[in-house]
């Protein structure tokens, strides 16, 4: 009887140990040590967008300057792939995660996984809906949306008929830029149509073509990013119409289009600076320093001079 009891106790201890919440060795961040021992995992929503390429370049350049290693993965605008990518980064033993979410809700599960393993998470440009994020490094998207609406009112007057091209549904940047835009537009403009074009240039073209057919009296278009705005420009040129287009990001193609007199304006971000600030925030967190929950990079409305 005693032997049976001892056996049961031993089995219970083994079971309890096996179910411990202690993370496996490969998933434990390296405590202390030189900054040059730090490995950062960077998950980008898509590298098929110049803005996010610049953001990635900012991270890589600043990490190299600090002597840190960076592992970069491209989600290709697929939220399921991004979750798997981040899981892989965790298994590679990264000390911190920099995540530019494709979908702010879908990314929450892996953020919570990182939280449970003690791996700090910094989000870039877009937030995560759930889980603990040490810092969000982004432009003030709400302010940027307001800037775009205010410029349309200033140039074309109140009650101007406007089309809105929205970004990826579920992305915080989509929600925030739309919110800022409507803070002004709902009172001073007439938004006659809006549709998601997923931050994509080709979709921006096709969605604009369709919306212009149903709304031929539109006088302005606000696109949640430059890629969609540039697609809208192509559709407008094919239609022969004269319509103001405002983008958001300030990427190279948009700036060239403004100089050429095609794109009217863009709310310019500083993606490389966002990347640099994110690396700095990760370093501070790993060294036990406090960081701001929201780290803002300045915006600027760019028009043809």
Image (spheres, rainbow, N blue to C red):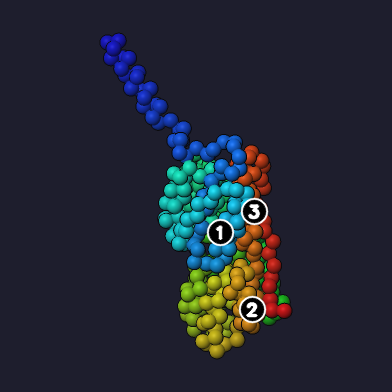
Q: In this view, does 118 lie above or below 41?
A: above
Q: Helix, strand, or loop for circle 3?
A: helix
Q: Quadrant of the C terminus?
A: bottom right
Q: Residue at x 42, y 51 (%)?
A: 84
Depth order, front residue of 47/105: 47
The circle on residue 56 is 1
Q: Which residue is drawn at 50% across and 59% down?
A: 45
Q: Is residue 70 above or below residue 194?
A: above
Q: Is residue 187 above or below residue 97?
A: below
Q: Which residue is drawn at 69% across and 76% down?
A: 303
Extreme-top residue of the structure = 2
Q: Residue at x 53, y 81 (%)?
A: 234
Q: Helix, strand, or loop for circle 2?
A: helix
Extreme-bottom residue of the structure = 240
Mark 3, residue position = 277
Mark 2, residue position = 258
Q: Between label 1 and label 2, give the one nearer the viewer.
A: 1
Residue 279 at x, y = what percent? 61, 51
Q: Alpha-carbon distance for marks 1 and 2?
A: 24 Å
- Label 3 environment density (alpha carbons within 10 Å; few <14, some 14–19, many ≥20): many
Residue 287 at x, y = what percent? 63, 40
The answer to which of marks 1 and 2 sits earlier in the sequence is 1
Q: Helix, strand, or loop for circle 1?
A: helix
The answer to which of marks 3 and 1 sits earlier in the sequence is 1
Q: Alpha-carbon distance for marks 2 and 3?
A: 28 Å
Q: Do the residues labelled 1 and 2 touch (CB within 8 Å)?
A: no
For the image, the number of numbered tags is: 3
Q: Can residue 64 be seen in this view?
A: yes
- Label 1 environment density (alpha carbons within 10 Å; few <14, some 14–19, many ≥20): many
Q: Determine whether, in the image, residue 126 is placed left or right of residue 4.
A: right
Residue 24 at x, y = what percent? 44, 35
């Amino acid at each position: 009887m005693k032997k049976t009891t001892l056996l049961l106790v031993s089995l219970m201890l083994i079971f309890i140990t096996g179910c411990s919440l202690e993370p496996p060795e490969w998933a434990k961040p390296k405590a202390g040590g030189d900054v040059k021992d730090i490995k950062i995992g960077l998950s980008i929503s898509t590298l098929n967008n110049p803005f996010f390429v610049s953001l990635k370049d900012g991270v890589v350049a600043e990490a190299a300057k600090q002597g840190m290693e960076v592992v970069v993965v491209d989600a290709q605008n697929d939220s399921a792939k991004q979750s798997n990518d981040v899981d892989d980064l965790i298994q590679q033993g990264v000390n911190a995660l920099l995540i530019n979410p494709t979908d702010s809700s879908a990314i929450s599960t892996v953020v919570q996984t990182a939280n449970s393993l003690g791996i700090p998470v910094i989000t870039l440009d877009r937030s995560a809906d759930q889980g603990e994020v040490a810092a969000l490094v982004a432009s003030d998207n709400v302010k940027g949306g307001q800037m775009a609406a205010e410029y349309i009112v200033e140039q074309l007057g109140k009650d101007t008929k406007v089309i809105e091209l929205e970004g990826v549904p579920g992305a915080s940047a989509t929600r925030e830029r739309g919110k800022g835009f409507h803070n002004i537009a709902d009172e001073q403009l007439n938004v006659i149509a809006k549709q998601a074009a997923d931050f994509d240039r080709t979709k921006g073209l096709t969605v604009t073509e369709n919306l212009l057919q149903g709304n031929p009296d539109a006088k302005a278009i606000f696109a949640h990013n430059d890629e969609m705005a540039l697609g809208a420009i192509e559709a407008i040129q094919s239609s022969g119409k004269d319509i103001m287009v405002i983008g958001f990001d300030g990427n190279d193609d948009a700036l060239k289009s403004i100089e050429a007199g095609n794109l009217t304006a863009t709310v310019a971000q500083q993606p490389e600076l966002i990347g640099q600030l994110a690396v700095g925030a990760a370093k501070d967190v790993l060294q036990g320093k406090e960081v701001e929950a929201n780290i803002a990079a300045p915006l600027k409305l760019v028009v043809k001079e």
